[in-house]
Image (spheres, rainbow, N blue to C red):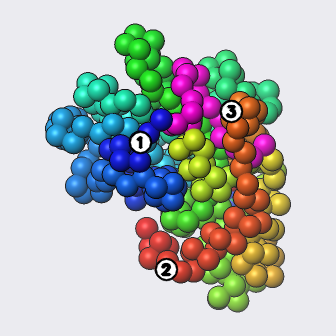
Amino acid sequence: MMEKDSKIYVAGHKGMVGSAILRELKKQGYENFILMTHSELDLIDQRAVEDFFESERPDYVFLAAAKVGGIIANSEALADFMYDNMMLEMNVIHSAFKTGVKKLEFLGSSCIYPRIAPQPMKESCLLTSELEKTNEAYALAKISGLKYCEFLNRQYGTDYISVMPTNLYGPNDNYHPTHSHVVPALIRKFHEAKVAGAPEVVCWGDGSPLREFMFVDDLAELCVFLMNNYSGNETVNAGTGKEVTIKELSELVAKTVGYEGKIVWDTTKPNGTPRKLLDVSKAEALGWKYHTELEEGLKISYDDFLNNPMRAER
Ligand code: GFB
């Protein structure tokens, strides 16, 4: 169990997931944080990361830093997604190990599971068949991170855990027009179309893929819960257990934003994996359940977009 004054390092605290974990920790009364921005500490720089851990010696680490992006960003920059994520994970996890961090939690993604896996996907389907090609590099990096935690536990008896969230959205998301994930991309597209009075909005693919979306604050609650209540080599899935088609999502975002024009589909853009629904029975058996429904989470996200215009510039 973390003490309220334990020294906690949240890697990636400026991002959507890291900032949500920090909010949750503060809400629960934790107060002793080590926080480094990207310009203060480049996690890809092995020497810098080692020096940082040597001098700061955190008790607990949440590893939420990652190079992330949507389907196009992933598929266009396969090499960068692999290198940046592998390097930063190995640097942080290894330095944590060398300096005796009590517990580390590594955050991954549901894209670690095979493209065509039995649905909903259990933690045990990891590495049972081929990965989805559009995010193969990112998935391989995330699999390496979770396996490195497992291998340290097995070889050296550490207490490092991992959690694999489904598609996330929420405050502090990245609203880049082409490189973001589908929820922030659609919030921006529909908002800009509404303001411009545009007759139609173009969405990618054919609208048929099924996706599960979870509000990031629900994940943050689970992350803190697992740090305090879970130990084990197998990862823990984090999701809602509910899915919608991308077409249904687009209609919901249009409604949230108040856009009444037409939605058209650009089938030259990839659909990605046809379906990726997580089996969340393990997290539920541990005593956690999501609580923000998609409609409500989208309203909060749209407010965040409206109140933080700089986000759209990223
Ligand atoms: O969120 P997204 O980029 O990633 O796309 P994935 C989800 C679905 O939404 C795809 C469609 O079928 C897209 O074709 N889509 C429709 C759009 N319109 C848009 C749009 O304007 N922007 C975007 N981005 N999508 C990612 C992985 O896969 O999931 C990452 O690439 C990561 O590795 C993440 O794991 C959670 O769900 O397909």
Q: Secondary structure at mark 1?
A: loop
Which-is-in-front pick, marks 3 and 2? 3
Amino acid type at image mark 3:
Leu
Rounded to the nearest angstrom, the CA distance separating label 3 from label 1 is 21 Å
Q: Name the residue beneath numbered marker 2.
A: 309
Q: Position of residue 142 (x, y in %)?
A: 49, 33
Q: Is residue 269 left or right of residue 306?
A: right
Magenta residues (range) = 226-241
Q: Name the residue beneath numbered marker 1.
A: 3
Quadrant where the C terminus sits is bottom left
Amino acid type at image mark 1:
Glu
Q: Is residue 112 visible?
A: no
Q: Please tell me in which quadrant of the rendered image residue 190 appears.
A: bottom right
Is residue 239 placed above or below 299 in the rendered structure?
above
Instruction: Tell whether label 2 touches label 3 (CB within 8 Å).
Output: no
Identify the residue at image location x=75%, y=60%: 294
Rounded to the nearest angstrom, the CA distance separating label 1 from label 2 is 37 Å
Is residue 190 placed above or below 184 in the rendered structure?
below
| Res. 286 mark | 3
Q: Is residue 228 left or right of residue 98?
A: right
Amino acid type at image mark 2:
Pro
Circle 1 residues within 10 Å: few <14, some 14–19, many ≥20:
few
Is 75 or 306 nearer to us in this picture?
Answer: 306
Rounded to the nearest angstrom, the CA distance separating label 3 from label 2 is 39 Å
Q: Position of residue 89 (x, y in %)?
A: 38, 34
Q: Ligand 1: does it lie within 8 Å of the C-beta at label 2?
A: no
